[in-house]
Image: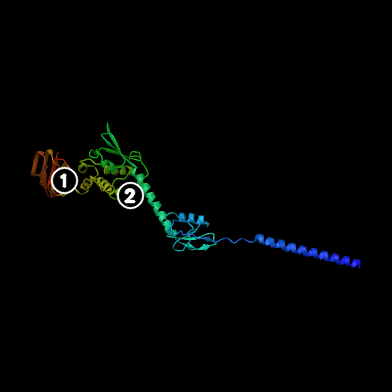
């Protein structure tokens, strides 16, 4: 009987211990489950960033607890190539301002598309580059004017020469990037366009930098008798003048350029009317002295002639086709009719 009771007691103890062990395991499992269960993230109130620039909106959303916002254009397309800047403002958010969300990021709708922003950036860069090129070009030419001996004044543009007391003298020289124009240099686009223009009108562009220097110097100032100067190739002179008018059409001496292009002139010498000079009425410059002229028939007979000791108003002569015309010490004759 005692043995039976002992066996019963042992069985009860073992079962009890097993039961206690099972309860402990359940308790541990329950505690472990509680330890790994995520704590729900509290909802965040979406601040009102409509009307703010993208950088301002990003800062406000960051302070509210959101990550960097995801920019979208007004077309709904996400920006993925460019970073919005201060020219890009928020027109809406998703979720909307005033709502609460558990999302970590906010979608912001901007006032323009990414393509528009890229196009605007490209245009701004091109404008900047153009302005920089214009500034470099403005400093590319330097003018030295004066008597070349005692007084020499420096100018950074031909317009500065116009406003100076050296303008009337016509005695100036030019350098391109600090070098004499005869020094071969690479041309900037505007200079190349100028050279191409002169070449298209039959001008001499064998040394392009020299051509550019000559034209830019003509824009600064010209001699008073510029329109009356005889050069070996008047076609080259006219081509250079056309180039100057394309660069500085507002020059104070633009009328002189126009005179070179349009006026009909002859110089001292022997001419055949209708061949080496046009028929019409010609006049010399005022103040000519010791001027002799004659008109003759095709056979050499004198039709009319005169020796002029001094003509304050100039001398006027009309010639006709087929005549011979001789001029000595009369200077330049300009056709006036």
Disc 2 crowd rating (10 Å Cα; few below 14, some 14-19, many 20+) is few
Which residue is found at the position 8% from the left and 42% from the top? 305
Q: Residues within 10 Å of mark 1 (few under 14, many from 20)?
A: some
Which one is nearer the viewer's eye here, 2 or 276? 2
Give x and y (percent) for residue 227: 21, 44
Q: Is residue 298 visible?
A: no
Residue 88 rendering spot, x and y as whole percentages: 43, 57
Q: Nearer the viewer, residue 69 or 31?
A: 31
Q: Position of residue 149 (x, y in %)?
A: 27, 31
Please tell me which residue is depicted at 84% across the width and 66% down the height of the picture: 11
The total of numbered circles placed on residues is 2
| Residue at image coords 39%, 53% | 124
Q: How is the image coloured?
A: rainbow
Q: Nearer the viewer, residue 309 or 245?
A: 245
Work out how far the residue at label 2 is from the one at label 1, CA to CA, in angstroms. Answer: 33 Å
Disc number placed over residue 40 in the picture, else none? none
Dot 2: element: helix
> Can residue 20 be seen by looking at this rendering?
yes
Location of residue 220 with respect to 96 vertically, above or below: above
As helix, strand or loop, the secondary structure at mark 1 comes to strand
Earlier sequence position, callout 2 versus callout 1:
2
Query: Who is closer to the viewer here, 22 or 266?
Result: 22
Q: Quadrant of the N terminus?
A: bottom right
Q: Which residue is mark 2?
A: 193
Mark 1 highlights which residue? 334
């Amino acid at each position: 009987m005692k043995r039976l009771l002992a066996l019963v007691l042992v069985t009860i103890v073992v079962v009890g211990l097993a039961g206690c062990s099972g309860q402990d395991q359940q308790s541990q499992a329950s505690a472990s489950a509680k330890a790994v269960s995520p704590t729900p993230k509290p909802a965040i109130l979406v601040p009102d960033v409509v009307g703010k620039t993208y950088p301002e909106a990003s800062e406000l959303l960051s302070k509210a607890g959101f990550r960097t916002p995801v920019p979208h254009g007004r077309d709904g397309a996400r920006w993925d190539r460019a970073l919005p800047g201060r020219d890009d403002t928020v027109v809406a958010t998703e979720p909307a301002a005033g709502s609460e969300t558990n999302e970590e990021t906010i979608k912001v709708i901007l006032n323009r598309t990414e393509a528009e922003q890229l196009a605007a950036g490209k245009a701004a860069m091109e404008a900047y580059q153009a302005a920089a090129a214009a500034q470099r070009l403005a400093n590319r030419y330097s003018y030295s004017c004066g008597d070349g001996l005692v007084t020499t004044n420096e100018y950074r543009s031909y317009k500065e020469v116009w406003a100076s007391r050296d303008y009337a003298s016509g005695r100036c020289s030019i350098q391109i990037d600090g070098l004499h124009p005869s020094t071969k240099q690479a041309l900037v686009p505007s200079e190349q366009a100028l050279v191409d223009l002169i070449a298209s009108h039959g001008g001499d562009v064998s040394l392009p930098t020299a051509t550019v220097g000559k034209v830019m110097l003509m824009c600064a100032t010209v001699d008073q008798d510029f329109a009356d100067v005889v050069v070996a190739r008047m076609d080259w002179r006219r081509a250079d003048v056309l180039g100057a008018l394309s660069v500085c059409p507002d020059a104070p001496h633009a009328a002189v350029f126009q005179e070179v292009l349009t006026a009909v002139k002859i110089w001292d010498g022997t001419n055949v009317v209708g061949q080496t000079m046009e028929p019409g009425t010609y006049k010399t410059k005022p103040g000519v002295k010791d001027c002799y002229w004659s008109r003759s028939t095709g056979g050499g007979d004198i039709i009319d002639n005169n020796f002029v000791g001094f003509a304050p108003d100039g001398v006027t002569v009309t010639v006709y086709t087929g005549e011979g015309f001789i001029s000595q010490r009369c200077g330049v004759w300009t056709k006036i009719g």
